Amino acid sequence: MKIYENYSLLRHNTFRLDVKTRWFVEYESESDLQKLLQDEYFFSQTFWHIGQGSNLLFLNDFGGIIVHSGIKGVETMREDKQHLWLKVGAAEDWDGFVAYCVEQGWGGLENLSLIPGEVGSSAVQNIGAYGVEAAERIEEVHAYSLKTGEKRIFSTDECRYAYRHSIFKEDDHRGLYYITHVVYRLDKRPTYRLDYGNVAAALDSKEINLKNVRATIIAIRRSKLPDPDVEGNAGSFFMNPYLCIAHYESLKKHFPDIPHYPVNDAVIKVPAAWLIEQCGWKGKSWGGAAVSERQPLVLVNRNHATGQEIAELSEKIRQSVKDTFGVELKTEVNFI
Ligand code: EPU
């Protein structure tokens, strides 16, 4: 177990905020974690578990214990003619894992290339991009309960996955499980999902294979999303809102060009990026924080922003989208 005092979280949050935590604790094995979950001092403090901090906004220094998993490794649990089941350590870098699968010729995760974060967070957040969600490929989530200290294996159904949602984000479970491993199911004979947005067009005349699909997704993401190492950010700051048909129809009367994607017979998804752009926020700044010119769903740390400034900017955007469209944007980013 690694323990650091007064530790900078600069490399542990993709907004690149130079905040400090009183304690930083990294467990490197399940037995380390078991020890931590029996420690009285730990439970007497405020604590928060992070991955790479790609979905977090620290508003201040953290006076308690930031916990991080150091459990790595990719192990084939079983396989049949079509599939492989890989047990992956929660601390594995997400894109490193995707790259490994693509190199091996195993399909299913290539559309999720270049998403920042770690494997453990992928199962909490149900990360998604270009028509694919992690949940489609997750078979089991291995976690320890903070209440009992015992290990529990969640099946996919038990994870209650939905758009950017899982049981691990629900009020009565949030922060109460530490994930050690996620079991992903990959295809030995890949099939491809190229129907989202401009993926097929961007592939152009290239051969459809895992490497080319990954390269194409990476090129699309690089053209649309700012690189956190150049300009700190946490990807989409808000979720795309789901509207009931009646709300959508009433908006369409005033805004005939509103982009929309049916979710089912009763629900329509509209892009938050469009709502934010219509409200005039694209490229605007507030202190050191700014709204990305390329993708207004992304807030960036342009010039030594504080967490407070980013939060204030997000609140102004939320309020103006509410005033203009009557739509309540929900943040995808967690405030700490
Ligand atoms: N749009 C604008 N103005 C812009 C950019 C986009 O109006 O400047 C509108 C357009 O109508 C466009 C629509 O937004 O068609 C959708 O844009 P895009 O396909 O780029 O994706 P998104 O809906 O903004 C979602 C995810 C991303 C994911 C992409 C691709 C959420 C909150 N975001 O963004 O996820 O990469 O689709 O699948 O669901 C993340 O979660 O951090 C993330 C980056």
Image (cartoon, grey):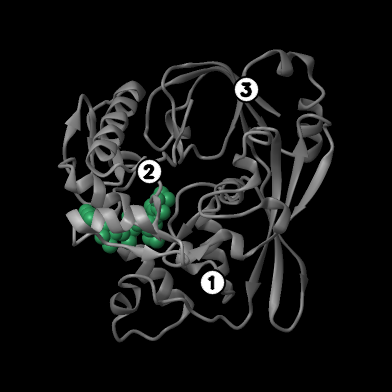
Q: Nearer the viewer, mark 1 or mark 3?
A: 3
Determine which residue is flagged by label 3: 47
Name the side, left or right, on which 39 lies relative to 183.
right
User: Is the residue 283 above or below the residue 335 in the image?
Assistant: below
Measured from the top left, where is residue 173 in percent x and y? Answer: 68, 36
Q: Nearer the viewer, residue 132 or 103?
A: 132
Q: CA distance from mark 1 to mark 3?
A: 38 Å
Determine which residue is flagged by label 2: 238
Q: Residue at x 71, y 44 (%)?
A: 180
Name the side, left or right, on which 252 lies relative to 187.
left
For ligand 1, the image quadrant comes to: bottom left
Q: Find numbered disc 3 in the image and state the secondary structure of the residue it sits on.
A: strand
Measured from the top left, where is residue 297 in percent x and y? Answer: 30, 46
Determine which residue is flagged by label 1: 103
Q: Amino acid at mark 1?
A: Glu
Q: Residues within 10 Å of mark 1 (few under 14, many from 20)?
A: few
Q: Residues within 10 Å of mark 3 (few under 14, many from 20)?
A: some
Residue 295 appearing in the image: no
Name the side, left or right, on which 274 lies relative to 121.
left
Q: Nearer the viewer, mark 2 or mark 1?
A: 2
Q: Find numbered disc 2 in the image and state the secondary structure of the residue it sits on.
A: loop
First reached walking from the N terminus: tag 1 or tag 3: 3
Q: Ligand 1 within 8 A of label 2's CB?
A: yes
Q: Amino acid at mark 2?
A: Phe
Q: Amino acid at mark 3?
A: Phe
